[in-house]
Amino acid sequence: MPKRHLASKLPKPLLEELETRLKSNNHSDFSSLSDWLKEKGYSISKSALFNYSRKMRKLESASADDDHASDIGLRMRCLEVAVRVPGTTDVIDSALPLFSWVTTGRRK
């Protein structure tokens, strides 16, 4: 029988707390986290926590890469718009307020 994934072993509130603790510990101190989970009634090994942390970091990195690629695309579109504004001498200075306007409310 295959091993159950860590996320399926823990209730959602406890998993969210674990993720918060992993982030605040800079994805380290798995021994303390394992002890903390044991106090909560869940026996999770340090290696399982390490593997879960590694997957978390990969997802966070992919999300950051997607945000960066999206920002580059938006910047390019803002430059394209700024170029078409009559009398524009500094395209970048004209594009920056457009980019700010487009991204307002989109960022966390």
Image (cartoon, grey):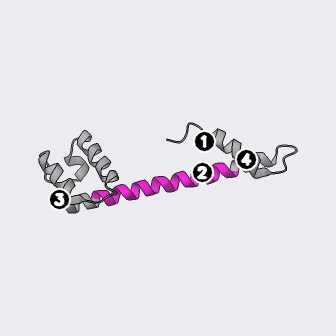
Q: Please state the horizontal and vertical placement of residue 76, each as a whole percent of the image.
A: 69, 52
Q: Residue at x 56, y 36 (%)?
A: 105
| Sequence-wise first label, 1 or 2 | 2
Residue ID for mark 2: 71
Which quarter of the rendered picture does the N terminus lie within? bottom left
Q: Amino acid at mark 2?
A: Asp
Residue ID for mark 4: 95
| Sequence-wise first label, 3 or 2 | 3
Estimate the spatial distance between the alpha carbons at disc 1 and disc 3, rounded to whole Å: 42 Å
Q: Which is more foreground, mark 4 or mark 2?
A: 4
Cβ atoms at labels 1 and 2 below 8 Å apart: yes
Position of 100 with respect to 108 (left or right) is: right
| Crowd band around label 4 with a 10 angstrom C-alpha radius: few (<14), some (14–19), many (20+) | many
Q: Please state the horizontal and vertical placement of residue 63, each as a whole percent of the image.
A: 46, 52
| Sequence-wise first label, 1 or 4 | 4
Q: Residue at x 82, y 43 (%)?
A: 85
Looking at the rendered structure, the secondary structure element under dot 3 is loop
